[in-house]
Amino acid sequence: MIWRRVLFRGGVLASVGIGGWIAGSVAERRKGNYEVKLSQNNDFSIPVPALPIFGTVSAATPIENSNALVSSVSDVDVTKPLSTSRVSQIMKFGFPGLDNIRSFDDYVLSYDRRNRVAHWVFEHLTAETVKHNDAVDRSKCQFTEDQSIHPYFRSVNKDYKGSGFDRGHLAAAGNHKSSQKHIEQTFFLSNMAPQVGEGFNRHAWNRLERHVRKLTKVYPNVYVCTGPLYLPRKEADGKTYIKYQVIGANSVAVPTHFFKVIVGEREDKALEMEAYVMPNQAISDDTPLHVYQVPPDSIERAAGLLFFDRISRDKLRSINGRKTTYV
DNA sequence: TTTTCTGT
């Protein structure tokens, strides 16, 4: 009962490579020769191994250690355990992966020690959590090293300084305005990735983040998973490589792309999914967001993750605005 | 409105 078995009408999914859908236009397709071929095995009727159910996951993940994570935030009561019920609410539809899970009060993160950037972050948004709040002041927030990450694997402010890249939020600050504590927790460097500032973090990517917040006007519950991608690219010698810049003394990886996979839950519990991949580069303001919509399974293959694995297929009504049909 | 950086 997983959405992965859901096929698009006409089965277009099977033959589309990332090179085609990332760019979204012929001109872009010629320019950017990123490509990730879908595997030869396109038989979606073969059951895909599912992640463990939440009960198994929660026992295996250091949720109880999360007190230590937030000890540097002044107004957190470290004597009070974080709410596991909030974590189970955020992660209602399953964990995309289980590597180095960190739970904060209002989002959950999986950390990639090798790249010093998260694998993914997961958020649950409602109209309430994203609405404007005079009591919350973003300008009081500071980018803070995440002390819960071993110093070998931790990114620090100095890594980003003078790099030319923004410290771009994965879990967006603007999604966590229900309390000062929540927004402050999005400023840990474990939640940052090097992003092109002008034209990307401050523009197109921000536009996508605002789009996600706006979905809370349509759906009572919005679930969003965000993360980096390091996509292969054909070089001049005709061979394919994964190449990405690293910055600072800690060699923080600069992702080639970022993804968002979003599920909106309607009043009647029907689910609608949108999935986006955007290149970490300046994007013109007149490029519509739908250009960056992609089949969610291609993000899964590229990222090594499984999204929303616990979604019941009879509840998933559409993907990227297309009605789904069942196998 | 929200996303940040640089230089003082």
Image (cartoon, helix red, strand yellow):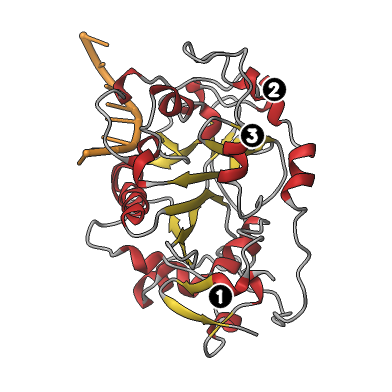
* Distance between the alpha carbons at the discs numbered 2 and 3: 24 Å
| For marks 1 and 2 on the same chain, the one whose residue lies earlier in the sequence | 1
Disc number for residue A17: 1
**What residue appears at the point 64 percent right and 71 percent down from the top-left corner?**
A4
Is residue A61 shown to the viewer in this render?
yes
Answer above or below: position of A198 versus A113. below
Kindly identify the amino acid type of the residue bearing the numbered disc 3.
Thr
Q: Which residue is mark 3?
A: A84
Is residue A120 shown to the viewer in this render?
no
| For marks 2 and 3 on the same chain, the one whose residue lies earlier in the sequence | 3
Disc number for residue A277: none
Chain of the residue that carries numbered disc 1 in the rendered image: A
**What residue appears at the point 60 percent right and 30 percent down from the top-left corner?**
A83
| For marks 1 and 3 on the same chain, the one whose residue lies earlier in the sequence | 1
* Distance between the alpha carbons at the discs numbered 1 and 3: 39 Å
**What residue appears at the point 60 percent right and 13 percent down from the top-left corner?**
A78
In the rendered image, residue A133, in percent from the top left (x then y), is placed at 28, 30
Kindly indicate the quadrant of the structure image that contains residue A183: top left
Q: Quadrant of the N terminus of chain A?
A: bottom right
